[in-house]
Image (cartoon, rainbow, N blue to C red):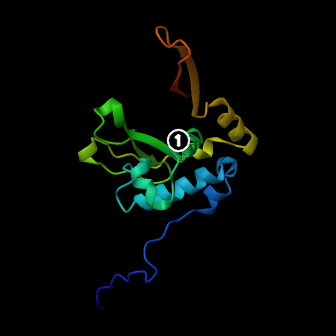
Amino acid sequence: MSKSKYIKDPNGQHIRLYKTMFNSPAWKALSNSAKALWLDLRVQTVGYTNGTATTALGVLSHSGWVSRHTVMNARRELEVLGFIELTHRGGICNGGKSPNLYRFTDLDMYDQQKYFIKAQKADHLYRNFNTKTEAQEALKKSKPFKEKVKVHKITAQGKDSSLRVEKISAEMVH
């Protein structure tokens, strides 16, 4: 008997969304943006690379993501409901050289020596929610990312007192 040959899928790579996840109360509580982000992150995870998916807008822009606030809110939902978990803190905390990295909780994660990530078995954190209402309450308790814009009016003093300058400062609120 000869060795069986690996047959490559003619349609290319695919993403699996199992019925147990699709029918879970946590999945039903997700917004459409969060579901779309889950799919885009899943595309980044090939074979043994679970734990290295990133929500960096530069990586996601090819998929049509343009608003970092939408990405941040969708990522927050996925984290709160246990679909993804932070594996490597990047950004300002890491000298600004690398993005935050995430793992899918429904997949086993292997060692990623480059990022000092240790192997971990799948723990399916999204299964911790028994009802859709319970999942929605967890989302309500977590604070969404919003940008508040404060306008400060400064009147110039001196020769031309009629000159008014408005200073706008953005304050990030979690």
As helix, strand or loop, the secondary structure at mark 1 comes to helix
Q: Is residue 117 above or below residue 36?
A: above
Q: Residue, x 35% and y 36% (percent of image)?
A: 91
Which residue in the rendered view is the most extreme toward the right? 133
Residue under the image location 44 percent in, 47 percent down: 55
> Looking at the figure, which quarter contains the C terminus?
top right
The location of residue 131, given as percent across then percent down, is 73, 44
**Label 1 environment density (alpha carbons within 10 Å; few <14, some 14–19, many ≥20):** some
Q: Position of residue 102 (x, y in %)?
A: 42, 45
Q: Quadrant of residue 152?
A: top right
Q: Position of residue 84 (x, y in %)?
A: 50, 46
Tell me the quarter of the picture where residue 146 sits: top right
Above or below 28: residue 15 = below
Compared with 22, 138 (above or below) is above
Q: In the rendered image, which quarter contains the N terminus?
A: bottom left
Residue that lies at the very extreme toward the top in this rendered image: 158
Look at label 1 and name its amino acid.
Answer: Met
Relative horizontal placement of residue 103, taking residue 77 as reference (left or right): left
| Pick the front one: 128 or 78 | 78
The residue at which mark 1 appears reads as 72
